[in-house]
Amino acid sequence: MLDKQSGIPIYIQIEDYLKEQIARGIYPVKSLIPSERELTDLFGVSRMTVRQSLTNLVKDGLLYREKGRGTFVAEEKMEQPLNGLTSFTEDMKERGLTPGTKLISFTKVHPDPQIAARLGITQEALVHKVVRIRYADDRPMAIERSYLPVSLFPTLTEEALRGSLYAFIEKQEMLVIGQATQRMEAALAKTEDAGYLQISLPSAVVLIERVSSLQDGRTFEVVRSTYRADRYKFLSEIGR
């Protein structure tokens, strides 16, 4: 199966072989692939070479490891476009998935200096702080911490937060959502978030801060989301 006379490194040939087996369904999603020792015997190469191939596939999100159990085929990542302003609920429905929400907390607090500055309010003003776990087909995808001015949404309820917040804003509050800016960065999951997202530590996550405004220019929301890096990838279309 391997061409040791080829200019292609052996570990890459092993990666390509495993990718092909996964694509053909020989190793379906969540299935256990052969162990390092089994692959070493199969290919007649060193265990270090096999380990390098598996490590690369884990980094690429094609495989994942469970301590004491082995290496498994990962679920395909969902692609999230960055060129449209949609809610999580709207996005999941467009993909044919069933969105779900678990409300962790809904409180009124005084914002920290950064949140206050983002919203254009003083620290003495009150904001709704909303913490929600977002699901797709009953699988946890993200944890969201949202901050919304109480003065702008005095009638916001827990019931509205169990569905699409944007639908509440547009249909019940009769406000027009305009635009948003997003900041993204990679990080390691914090202990609390790992529990919410059902991931082990250490695990990579994607942090996104979105600041959204109404069409009239008023900032109505700051959302800090932690996405599972093993289930999400982001797509941006750009032009010269």
Image (cartoon, helix red, strand yellow):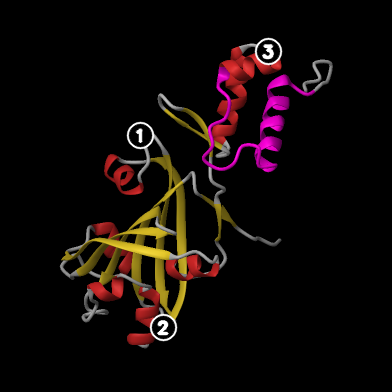
Circle 3 sits on which residue? 45
Give the quadrant of the N terminus.
top right
Query: Which residue sits at x=55%, y=22%?
Result: 35
Query: Which residue sits at x=18%, y=65%?
Result: 107
Name which residue type carries label 3: Val
Report the span colored magenta.
8-36
Residue 81 vertical placement versus 2 (above, below): below
Name which residue type carries label 1: Leu
Q: Position of residue 70 (x, y in %)?
A: 48, 27
Mark 2: few/some/many CA within 10 Å (<14, 14-19, 20+): few
Nearer to me, 101 or 150: 101
Asked if the magenta segment contains residue 161, the reply would be no
Nearer to me, 163 or 222: 163
Residue 210 vertical placement versus 165 (above, below): above
Q: Which mark is residue 201?
A: 1
Circle 2 sits on which residue? 216
Left/right of residue 231 with respect to residue 187 in the rendered view: right
Residue 12 vertical placement versus 131 (above, below): above
Asked if the magenta segment contains residue 27, the reply would be yes
Q: Position of residue 81 (x, y in %)?
A: 57, 61
Q: Label 1's element? A: loop
